[in-house]
Image (cartoon, rainbow, N blue to C red):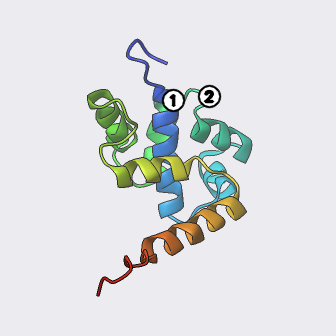
Amino acid sequence: MDAAGLNIDLIVGTAMKRRRRQMGMSQVDLGHAVELGFQQIRKYERGDSSITVARLWRFAQVMEVPIAYFFQDLMQSAASPTPAASDADQIQYLFDRIDHADVRRTLLELTRVVATFEPPKPWGAR
């Protein structure tokens, strides 16, 4: 963490994971593209390992984004105490941290049910 209490490695890793998923790539696919093992990709995405500038540059090339892409959430985090600027961004940020596909699917289904839930009307209301 830096002096402001921000985990920059996690913020960059979360952006990397989000972009990888947008591109439909697995950790193995991305690892092959940048000549790393999927375990190292996982460490980067979880913020467990720092990424060198040279390696981040390579990720940006492979993922077809400007290098600043990986720091967009950092600017939001510096401006607010939450990891993202809105509830939807915060939900996405936290959802991206879930590694288990079954848990992600279950949470997604739960969200669908809650989003379409209509509470019962009070007795006598039309």
Residue bearing mark 1: 9
Identify which residue is drawn at 29% across, 31% down: 80
Rate crowding at label 2 as few (under 14), some (14 to 19) or many (20 or more) other CA atoms within 10 Å: some
Using the image, tell me which numbered label, if any, was put on residue 49.
2
The answer to which of 69 and 1 lies nearer the viewer is 1
The kind of residue tagged 1 is Asp
Can you give x and y, in whole percent of width and height, for residue 45 in the image? 58, 41
Q: Is residue 87 above or below residue 36?
A: below
* Local secondary structure at mark 1: helix
The kind of residue tagged 2 is Ser
Distance in Å between CA atoms under marks 2 and 1 = 7 Å
Rate crowding at label 1 as few (under 14), some (14 to 19) or many (20 or more) other CA atoms within 10 Å: many
The answer to which of 121 and 65 lies nearer the viewer is 121
Label 2 with label 1: CB-CB less than 8 Å: yes
Residue farthest to the front, as pictured? 124
Dot 2 or dot 1, earlier in sequence: 1
Identify which residue is drawn at 46% across, 76% down: 117
